[in-house]
Image: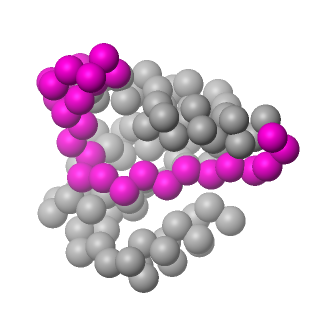
Amino acid sequence: MNSALNLATLVRRSGKLPSMAFLTDGKGNIDLEGQPGRQKAMSDAAQIAEIGRTLNIPAIFIDCGRRGNPELANIADKMGGAYLCLPRANAQAISALAQSHLE
């Protein structure tokens, strides 16, 4: 998430209009220091999401886990992005969702 946000910021500086799409099961397990640990990783993700909200870059979070993850929905909300649960993800469905939510 942090890398995507940094890249989107660079793209915006070049005069383009970036957007971000995250395809995940919503179970962060590596923190910003590269260390394992779900609790710290999710805390870091929430902080990055709050920073992302201030930058106002459109984002969509596609949850491809077997069951929806309320923590991921919360992170999407903190970033001001859309959260979509798509447990049986395929390329066509993901592409259609991303295009409809990021235009």
Give the percent coordinates (x, y) of residue 79.
Answer: 52, 37
Picture coordinates of residue 14 (x, y %)? 81, 40
* Residue found at x 30% / y 17%: 33
The quadrant in which the N terminus is found is: top left
Which quadrant is home to the C terminus? bottom right
Would residue 19 be found to the left or right of residue 90 on screen? Answer: right
Residue 2 as seen in the image, left or right of residue 34: right
| Span colored in magenta | 14-40
Q: Is residue 44 above or below residue 93?
A: above
Residue 7 at x, y percent in the picture: 60, 38
Q: Which residue shows up at 23% across the image and 68% down it?
A: 87
Q: Tell me, yes or no, whether the highlighted magenta stretch contains residue 19.
A: yes
Residue shown at 67% from the left, 34% from the top: 9
Main SS of residues in magenta: loop
Asked if residue 54 can be seen in this view, the reply is yes
* Figure check: 97 above or below 4: below
Residue 37: quadrant of the picture:
top left
